[in-house]
Image (cartoon, coloured by chain):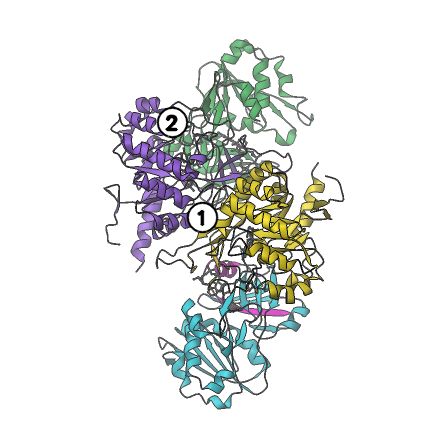
Chain colours: A green, B cyan, C yellow, D purple
Amino acid sequence: MIIEKEEILPGIYRIAFEVPLSFIDEAQPGRFIQLEVSHDSFPVTRRPFTISSTSGNSVEIIFEVVGRGTEILAETDEGRSLRLLGPLGCGYRLNPGKWLLIGGGLGAAGFPGLAARTECDLLLLGASSRDKLLTIPGLETAAITEDGSSGRNGLITDLLETVLWDSFGSIALCGPVPMMKAVIEMMPLQARANTQVSAEARMGCGWGACEGCSVPKAGGGFLKCCSDGPVFPADSIDWERWEGIH
Amino acid sequence: MIIEKEEILPGIYRIAFEVPLSFIDEAQPGRFIQLEVSHDSFPVTRRPFTISSTSGNSVEIIFEVVGRGTEILAETDEGRSLRLLGPLGCGYRLNPGKWLLIGGGLGAAGFPGLAARTECDLLLLGASSRDKLLTIPGLETAAITEDGSSGRNGLITDLLETVLWDSFGSIALCGPVPMMKAVIEMMPLQARANTQVSAEARMGCGWGACEGCSVPKAGGGFLKCCSDGPVFPADSIDWERWEGIH
Amino acid sequence: MDKPYKWTFWNREFDSPILLASGTAGFGLELMEQGFLCGAAAVISKATTLAPREGNPPPRIVETRFGLLNSIGLANPGVDEVLKTLLPQAVDLPCPLIINVAGDTVEDFPAVIERLEESPVPFGYEVNVSCPNVAAGGIAFGASPEIVERISILARSVSSRPFSVKLTPNEGSIVESAIAAEAGGADAVTVCNTFLGMKMDWRTGKAPLKRNVGGYSSPALLPLTVARVFKTSSAISIPVLASGGVNRAEDILELIAAGAAMVQVGTWLMRRPDAARELRDSMVSLLEDSP
Amino acid sequence: MDKPYKWTFWNREFDSPILLASGTAGFGLELMEQGFLCGAAAVISKATTLAPREGNPPPRIVETRFGLLNSIGLANPGVDEVLKTLLPQAVDLPCPLIINVAGDTVEDFPAVIERLEESPVPFGYEVNVSCPNVAAGGIAFGASPEIVERISILARSVSSRPFSVKLTPNEGSIVESAIAAEAGGADAVTVCNTFLGMKMDWRTGKAPLKRNVGGYSSPALLPLTVARVFKTSSAISIPVLASGGVNRAEDILELIAAGAAMVQVGTWLMRRPDAARELRDSMVSLLEDSP
Ligand SMILES: Cc1cc2nc3c(=O)[nH]c(=O)nc-3n(C[C@H](O)[C@H](O)[C@H](O)COP(=O)(O)OP(=O)(O)OC[C@H]3O[C@@H](n4cnc5c(N)ncnc54)[C@H](O)[C@@H]3O)c2cc1C
Ligand SMILES: Cc1cc2nc3c(=O)[nH]c(=O)nc-3n(C[C@H](O)[C@H](O)[C@H](O)COP(=O)(O)OP(=O)(O)OC[C@H]3O[C@@H](n4cnc5c(N)ncnc54)[C@H](O)[C@@H]3O)c2cc1C
Ligand SMILES: Cc1cc2nc3c(=O)[nH]c(=O)nc-3n(C[C@H](O)[C@H](O)[C@H](O)COP(=O)(O)O)c2cc1C
Ligand SMILES: Cc1cc2nc3c(=O)[nH]c(=O)nc-3n(C[C@H](O)[C@H](O)[C@H](O)COP(=O)(O)O)c2cc1C
Ligand code: FES
Ligand code: FES
């Protein structure tokens, strides 16, 4: 059941659902849910959303309206029950040590939960403009926007020049594929090896059965975003092929 | 626009629409409208309803919920605008002289408008039970129900035994096909020749283009319910073949 | 695409790519009376056959949850009556009329067309080798490239007016049939007629349609039409007229992007007799708003 | 029908007529873990081929307004890996597993089946001669009655387990192919695989699927399946397994009334992994409430 809904930025919503406690136990950062947004037969499939955070018996997601499914969701009233599958997939390996989080646009949606469970030292956020820039309270944050409406003016890669890569044992990266690829390419090899990326792909089932959610695998073949991921070691992905898709 | 909606009997509604005056001018009794009940793509076609009555700049229909289209219509709120085509088809020939109206169930839906424009002397109404029996104020009425819950107990044909057929110059008949056929068969030949029936058929377009709304024609072939009718001389219909369809 | 938007088809320029599909617009006369032909490039008539046809027993229209089954059975007054009564009235249509021609035998097609040549009215023909609702001819013709080619050759031999062959998605290979139509001299193919469909009442074990199966149409079938338009238009060089599933301006643009020269609107026209103008206008707005 | 309701298929009795369609249930392992196989008569596996297959480049799933396009391309680890890793785990499934078999050549089919005979797990096979998403084989096989018969004879020759031949609605005659499957020794036909469909982005002129066309599924296609089940089941005496468009209990009853022995649920299973129980229960309620 939707217990809270809020438009936190224009077209960007935060929704909290009431869930059983067993759900919360398994809601590790980076895992996702498959939400039945449709109230009838169409759209046919569910929609995947990263678990943004959990507390008590509620789970939160943050999403942007980009098409019909998210539109329906944004219009769904508090108090209404939606079918929700999850937590699904493999989340972040919660390594000890200091974390650097790098998020592009809605890619930061999963960071609140991750930051709560790790020693997060720095958050780098990029977005097209202030209207798309998520804020995550309590974290040391550097932000950059393409139009300069908030933080520095530029691309997230511009923020990376001053990063002291050695000081982070783990890096979490999530955003549009071209942005992630550009970030990866600027990293020293060691940082890259320490990076976990949270991937997106169009999904059918969400639970490993349909082979619909392929992400190109380093060395050939495909990974299943929903069950091999959605969080992957950066090195396990074939970035060239992946960028080619987008 | 729907300006009034009322559930007059369980599952039976009266709806009034605001229409242009040009519509009212052409809304002869027996003509019908094609209503776009669907708010999206499904159900695909419109739904036909007899014009029940008109007044000022409003037109009324009376309908029963029998499926998805009428269900949607029953749930559509006052104030909402629906696309409405019409008035369509050929209505009653409004002969002078005394009229007898015979209606089965919702077949009487069109009688208020007809009674207002003719010298209507007697209304015979049959229905399965009181819950399905329309009442038309101001008319001398004899009613019969199959379960005896209102008026006499029996079928409409039981009411016909005492009818003085010669005293009516015109007869209007509307109801389920088997009922109409039974009524026709009890009539003296002359009465039959004076009878106009209001027919129903599943419709595609409603305006003569699709050949979807066939009613078997006496002597072979088909009539188009929507443009040759829906009101037909009783003798122009092949009742055997028509009953066979139902 | 440049403004004002124009679509050229069969050597004529139109300000709309929309054709009114056969069987859903009659001969255009009712729509003309209401002023509803504005926005249509041309009307395609109800099927015309050599002899008059009563059509199938009712019900002929049955709705399903997400679409429509029809079983009209080519009801029409026959070519003589069409020539005598309907075409003279059609002289007043504000847009060209294409006559949809059907037959029980291969020879019926040239025979009907030959008769129609007597009238100055037809802009061209649509040769319907794909009706799902008749016992003889119908789908069976369209499924065989040999028969499609033969009928095209015969049609070509009796008329110099342009004609399109309306193909079936139900049997055979629509691509091979399109190639055969082109080889036989057709000036276009229509892709495609309705899909064979059926409704069954599980409580009674009976199908509401007396012939059990009918022609199924639905906006949900658009992707099937897009695929078939794409495949046929990649294989032939004559124009492809798309038919099936259109109820939005976006659908028309999608079919054109997939390779259609013109796009037909059928079932939706029964819902919105003024669909041509509505769709054309909103299509033009989309084109104007897009970079 | 008498209570308790039973459906007999391939000499086994089931308390449900529901099969989980190939490609939408994996090998049933994920569903088993969640306890979601209750209500399913059997699981039909993802297509298995001789060699491992990567499958098609992403995106592989694209939604349209009223349905789903998929272009998976028979991604699977190959029969060796299936035998080594998946089938041993499938021993624990609470219901039988039918293996869907695909191939690039006619000879691939008996080769894969012969390998699978080594395992005690398969209850039977579904011979997939109708995949819309591969270049070789696929639809082309299913469109030819001769090839369908040949593949059926080969499958029969290497196994005494029952098998169904999964037919295509996209080319050829599904009735003739069904007759050919029966003649070749098949124990059932599956009617049918997905319809060829496509989406085109009119602004870019590009199709989101890299192979342009894909397999289209939608609840709106149910009437197409009903018609094809009716026509094939009237023409053959082996059971027809219906596949396409099911998302309600009524749909299952309608397909059975049209002639289906068992009914598959595919796309809807991705939306509702517990669909089998939901649909079975509500189907039983409908049967109980009907006179
Ligand atoms: C594991 C995972 C986690 C996600 N978490 C979030 C989240 O926390 N917040 C959030 O806002 N979004 C998230 N997404 C993306 C979200 O699922 C899509 O935005 C949503 O499904 C779009 O649905 P729609 O019906 O509104 O759009 P549609 O009408 O289906 O599509 C609109 C546009 O988005 C594209 N698109 C649709 N689905 C996807 C997809 N899965 N991947 C990439 N492009 C797509 C389409 O190509 C189209 O251009 C996540 C996706 C995945 C796979
Ligand atoms: C000229 C005309 C005038 C009509 N006037 C009225 C009226 O004044 N009041 C009123 O209540 N109804 C009237 N009807 C009937 C009304 O149109 C149908 O009840 C309505 O279309 C059913 O729509 P639905 O979507 O609710 O039912 P559906 O879900 O489409 O069907 C429900 C059941 O009704 C049957 N059915 C559907 N349409 C028709 C039809 N046109 N004829 C016969 N059976 C049908 C179906 O077979 C099915 O069993 C009229 C019909 C015609 C042709
Ligand atoms: C009621 C009805 C009657 C039809 N009659 C004909 C016909 O006579 N000849 C023909 O070639 N197609 C006929 N068709 C098919 C349509 O012309 C059109 O090809 C098909 O319905 C698909 O397009 P749509 O989805 O826009 O309806 C008919 C369709 C319907 C719904
Ligand atoms: C994602 C997806 C993958 C599929 N993979 C296969 C497959 O590997 N083999 C096969 O025979 N059919 C495959 N199909 C077809 C389904 O088994 C089923 O026949 C079809 O989707 C129609 O049924 P539905 O409407 O219930 O989905 C696949 C369908 C989908 C949607
Ligand atoms: S979405 Fe089905 S396997 Fe990943
Ligand atoms: S409903 Fe179309 S002709 Fe009557």
- Asked if residue C271 lies left or right of residue D6, the reply is right
- Residue type at mark 1? Leu
* Magenta span contains residue B59: yes
C172 to B177, vertically: above or below: above
> Residue at horizontal 67%, vertical 67%?
B20
Figure quadrant of residue B35: bottom right
Instruction: Give residue C111's position: percent from left, percent from top.
Output: 59, 57
| Location of mark 2 (residue) | D49
Figure quadrant of residue C201: bottom left
Q: How much space separates mark 2 and mark 1, taking CA atoms?
A: 29 Å
Q: Say whether residue A101 is visible.
A: no
Query: Which numbered circle lies on residue D224?
Result: 1
- Tell me the subunit letter for badge 2: D
Q: Nearer the viewer, residue C188 or A1?
A: C188
- Asked if residue C288 lies left or right of residue D56, the reply is right
Q: Nearer the viewer, residue C231 or B28?
A: C231
Determine the secondary structure under disc 1: helix
> Residue at horizontal 43%, vertical 19%?
A93
- Tell me the subunit letter for badge 1: D
Q: Residues within 10 Å of mark 2 (few under 14, many from 20)?
A: many
Instruction: Give residue D110's position: percent from left, percent from top.
Output: 33, 29
Determine the secondary structure under disc 2: loop
- Asked if residue D250 lies left or right of residue B139, the reply is left
What residue span does the magenta drawing correspond to? Answer: B57-79
* Magenta span contains residue C15: no
Query: Which numbered circle lies on residue D216?
Result: none
- Residue type at mark 2? Thr
Q: Quadrant of the N terminus of chain B?
A: bottom right
Instruction: Give residue A173's position: percent from left, percent from top.
Output: 53, 21
